[in-house]
Image (cartoon, helix red, strand yellow):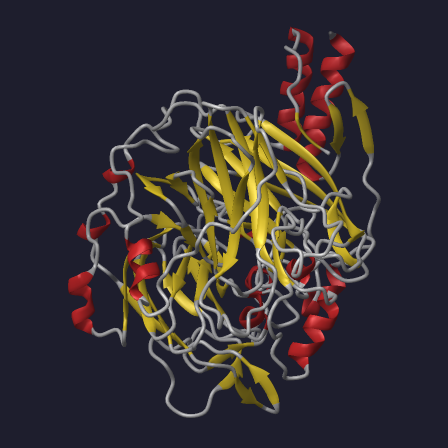
Amino acid sequence: MSATRSAPAPTSTALAVFASLLLLVGPTSAGDPYAYFDWDVSYVSAAPLGVKQQVIGVNGQFPGPIVNVSTNWNVVVNVLNDLDEPLLITWNGIQHRKNCWQDGVLGTNCPIPSGWNWTYQFQVKDQIGSFFYFPSLNFHRAAGGYGGIIVNNRDVIAVPFDKPDGDFTVFIGDWYNKDHKDLRKALDDGKSLGMPDGVLINGKGPYRYNKTLVPAGIDYETINVHPGRTYRFRVHNVGISTSLNLRIQNHNMLLVETEGSYTVQQNYTNLDIHVGQSYSFLVTMDQNASSDYYIVASARFVNESLWRRVTGVAILRYSNSRGKASGPLPDPPQDLYDKTYSMNQARSIRWNLSAGAARPNPQGSFRYASINVTQQYLLRNEPPVMINGERRATLNGISYSPPETPLRLADQYTVKGVYTLDFPTRPLKGSPKLARSVINGTYRGFMEIIFQNNDTNVQTYHMDGYAFFVVGMDYGEWTEDSRGTYNKGDGVARCTTQVFPGAWTAILVSLDNVGIWNVRAQNLDTWYLGQEVYVRVVNPEDTNKTELPIPGNALYCGLLQKYQKEQVPHHRVKSSSGIIYAEGKFVILMLFLVAIATFT
């Protein structure tokens, strides 16, 4: 279970105790609220498509609990790894300002060993919006382990729409009945994953819209609403590799936000949501409720003659509904011979320049088109290739092979030879290769990245630690002349963008966040096969103001394994506001609450 906790008003004696503790342990960011979460990540049994299998739950929940906080809050998540494999949790879209130590990917963190726990601590600094977390190692996301993150506006910052009557988080994604270990082994053996077995909505199978495809007894999602009211739907594609089209029968979806940016508000009858992407819609219950309504997530860009799989179907149920949903599902986009439909839809998503977000100033006050580009990378992917007898995926002819020692940890301890700073700005000529080559980013530089997709499937790309501006996309090969088509005014800022097959997408990003940050394919199969790179951003000035120090509970592995101590169980202190974990500088918070309880 998750909870947001606040302490009672301290007495003067308690404040004096707190002040003395501050002198002992040094400054903290105690001015902003803290939210504490205690998670047990373990296997649970489920049968979302009617086949019993092992999935990954958080506190026994699949999907996991929602992290619901506000701008600038500090988030503390104690994770107990009850899996039989090492674990990392990454926070998709959370920027971790000055703190890549909490990113939860192999480039910065050693995995949490089985049976151990580790406490993440980060601040959602200057952010709002809809995001999600998921396990980043060992193909775990194919088995679940994901959940939502909501970052609300501060009370002093206006939201550019009326407060909705309710808030729903919706996870959509393709699903296999095979165990994630079997899927992983298939990739290790040089095979493709093949067609998914279906599409889930909130970890559940489809409503029985088709008695031939959908067996009886499948548990499906029902969203209960009241007529005349407006609700916010936060939708995340947490699947493996399938783009999905979302639609709600007879209802318009007003797009208002994507991955931390308020958008120009536009109605859609359907929207393509690609792997790893997140969107917020306002949906008004303006129908007569003669029956329930379908919520549909269907596969896109698949061969319909081969895709004979179940579609994701949930139910929207009005409180005055007079019957069950029946009949055909609402039609998907009719664009079999029009490959520009989805791209034009993506281009229509624009930044709301007049809305505020995390700060009082409007989003449009950052005029990205007036900033000179200082670095440029064209990252091209190809269909998987054989390298040293293994099937691998590449960017610019390089398939990333993670070292045993995380990159950021190697930097901290000046360990040489873990990686190289020679990632090519253009695709390599010659044979593809395995490497640990990293992009050397310039601190406070402005980088242009062009993703060129020469594969046959839609790929989505994500950058940790940053929001970037999606300024252009088109079919064909990118050229210097392509810059003439860029959106130089209201390209949306987000953290995950799609790249259509045989097409390119261009982004601009301001490198103002020190650390080593992952740029990856969100498609789980190609990411697993090596389609990723890291961007190293270092402040050349010797200062501790641009990056937080290594956390006191850092795990050690690889060449630094000698520094790892045996796991010491956390000391738990029960208080009226819940469990506080005394680890590192959190001991001050524990003692503060004890002081409050003692002196009030």
Q: Which residue is drawn at 44% across and 34% down?
A: 283
Question: For residue 144, what is the image quadrant?
Answer: bottom right
Q: In this view, does 66 lie above or below 51?
A: above
Q: In this view, does 16 lie above or below 520?
A: above
Query: In the image shown, does 419 or 549 lie closer to the viewer?
Result: 419
Query: In the image shown, does 383 or 527 lie closer to the viewer?
Result: 383
Q: Where is residue 118 in the image (x, y as percent from the top left)?
A: 72, 48
Image side of residue 362 versus residue 66, left or right: left
Q: Position of residue 31 (x, y in %)?
A: 53, 24
Q: In which quarter of the image is the N terminus?
A: top right
- Disc tally is 0
Query: In the image shown, does 316 or 565 lie closer to the viewer?
Result: 316
Image side of residue 399 versus residue 142, left or right: left
Query: In the image shown, does 409 or 259 lie closer to the viewer?
Result: 259
Whether residue 126 can be seen here: no
Q: Residue at x 65, y 61 (%)?
A: 213
Image side of residue 543 versus residue 375, left or right: right
Q: In this view, does 476 lie above or below 485?
A: below
Q: Where is residue 210 in the image (x, y as percent from the top left)?
A: 62, 55
Whether residue 142 can be seen here: yes
Q: Position of residue 346 (x, y in %)?
A: 33, 55
Q: Quadrant of the C terminus?
A: top right
